[in-house]
Image (tube, rainbow, N blue to C red):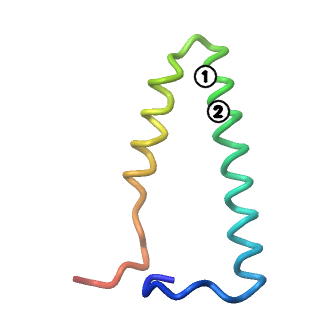
Amino acid sequence: MPDGTPVACHEKLKVLNENFVELQQMLQDALEDAVLLGCSEAQVRAVFAEMIERLENPYREAQ
């Protein structure tokens, strides 16, 4: 949780883990496709990192 307390609900953890597994597979597939298409692995990884950095939290409290 944002305040540092652990997520305690089993179902919440299950959903988070399922999301992470799905995301990992999507990223793996995208990396493999890009490399097969002749893209640089390092560039693709850099794009992934940039995409993560650009993610916005729609639930962030107003500052």
- Which SS class for mark 1? helix
45 relative to 58, above or below: above
52 relative to 41, above or below: below
14 relative to 49, above or below: below
19 relative to 15, above or below: above
- Which SS class for mark 2? helix
Quarter placement of the C terminus: bottom left
Task: Find disc 2 in the rendering and name its residue.
Answer: 30
The residue most toward the left is: 63
The residue most toward the top is: 38
Residue 7 located left or right of residue 9: left
Q: Position of residue 23 (x, y in %)?
A: 66, 51
Is the Cβ of the residue at disc 1 closer than 8 Å to that at disc 2? yes
Q: Position of residue 8 (x, y in %)?
A: 67, 88
- Give me the residue at 44% from left, 35% from top: 47
Callout 2 amino acid: Ala
- Give me the residue at 77% from left, 82% from top: 11
In the rendering, which numbered label is found on residue 61? none
Question: 10 Å neighbourhood of mark 2: few (<14), some, or many (≥20)?
Answer: some
Q: CA distance from mark 1 to mark 2?
A: 6 Å
Callout 1 amino acid: Ala
- Give me the residue at 72% from left, 88% from top: 9
Q: Position of residue 50 (x, y in %)?
A: 39, 42
Residue 6 located left or right of residue 62: right
In the rendering, which numbered label is found on residue 34? 1
Q: Residue 51, located in which quarter of the rendered image? A: top left
Q: Position of residue 60 (x, y in %)?
A: 37, 78
- Give me the residue at 43% from left, 87% from top: 3
